[in-house]
Image: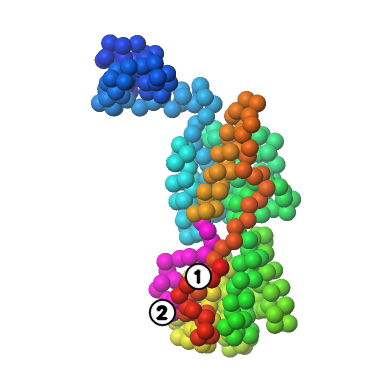
Amino acid sequence: MIIKKVSMKDVANELGVSVALVSYVLNGKKTDKINAQTAAKIRSTALKMKYSPNQIAKSLKTSKTHTLGLIVADISNLFYSSIAKYIEEEANLHGYHIIYGSAYEEPQRFNSILHLLLSRQVDGLILAIPEKAEDCIQQLTDMEQPFVILDRKFYNYPKAPAILLDNFHASTTIVQHLIDNGYKRLGVVTINRGLINLQERKTGFEKTVFELLKQQPFIYEVEEDDMENQMQTLIPRAISEDKVDCLCFFTNKVAMAALAKVAAMEIKVPDQLGIVCFDEAESYNLFRTPVTYFRQPLKEMSHAAIANLVAQMESKGAANSTVQVTSTMPIEFKGTLVVRESSVRNAKIPRAPDIE
């Protein structure tokens, strides 16, 4: 059985009024010239008849679909699933719906999803662009398509609108905290990728360790698709051969794989090995020692992404617009080191509060 969609004409016929009057009321136009009781009756009847606007027809008239496209690097990653939640909430407050896609760091998959979103005529895009897919930045710029890059930086496009963490500052903060707690042989575990955000974390860590200890930290790189197996040899080597006394895990996926091995080896944390992780994850609570982690301001970053994108869209849509885009330059946020027992040796340093 095919159910006929209720139209404005059906609502008008039900009440014996003009279609134009129904249109004015349901679209919020000329409200100061329409009798309040009549307007209320029209809204009540439309609701009772389960009228819903024809979004396709509406978009043809306004050239807007009130949808935004969001492509994350990996929706299974807690960082991206969390930030996607905040982005959707903020977009809804501005009257936009989100269409999701997950590229899983594959350039071809990313480009396929991007073309699909553009064919759906989304009003704006928020993109975590994989390596070797950054050519889309110039293409979108040439198309005058509003977009914001999320959590990614590309040296060839220094002025592209982007929402980022100050990764160098994050590593500096972590190293200073570890050294203040008496750690001398610092190590990092990261994934073998060329992503600039990870490279900046690495650079910040190396430079700060050298400045404060006059030595280089131990850098361990693992393949993303084989982390658990590689941790079987990496953690024992770091502890026994390299005599590392603390490790910083640069992603939450690396951290979860490593923490499982640390627990299985019954390594004493923080006395035998200090631990700091990037990002917040509920799974950290399963570890017997409360884990110190670096928290990114996901909610604030999400709000900034939507604000920047909305400003771009309003500027594009307004004739002779005086609307000022929030920023077409990258916006960097400072995160917070949440200090817990896994990295605290110095009794003078409090274990509970957040250290900026």
Residue type at mark 1? Asp
> Pointer 2: residues within 10 angstroms few (<14), some, or many (20+)?
few
Q: Say which residue appears at 66% left-offset and 79% top-offset.
A: 218
Q: Where is residue 198 in the image (x, y as percent from the top left)?
A: 64, 64
Q: Say which residue appears at 53% left-offset and 35% top-offset.
A: 122
Q: Position of residue 180 (x, y in %)?
A: 60, 81
- Tell me: residue 76, above or below residue 13: below
Quick check: can you spot residue 115?
no
Which corner quadrant holds the C terminus? bottom right
Please tell me the numbered disc located at residue 288: 2
Looking at the rendered structure, the secondary structure element under dot 2 is: loop
Please tell me the numbered disc located at residue 354: 1
Q: In this view, does 14 lie to the left or right of 343?
A: left
Q: Does the magenta stretch include residue 297?
A: yes
Q: Is residue 215 left or right of residue 310?
A: right
Q: Is residue 171 magenta?
A: no
Q: Say which residue appears at 67% left-offset and 60% top-offset.
A: 196
Residue type at mark 2? Arg
- Tell me: residue 60, above or below residue 281: above
The range drawn in magenta is 277-298
> Pointer 1: residues within 10 angstroms few (<14), some, or many (20+)?
some
Looking at the rendered structure, the secondary structure element under dot 1 is: strand
Viewer-nearest residue: 214 or 52: 214
Q: Position of residue 253 (x, y in %)?
A: 51, 66
Q: How is colour applied across the structure in the image?
A: rainbow
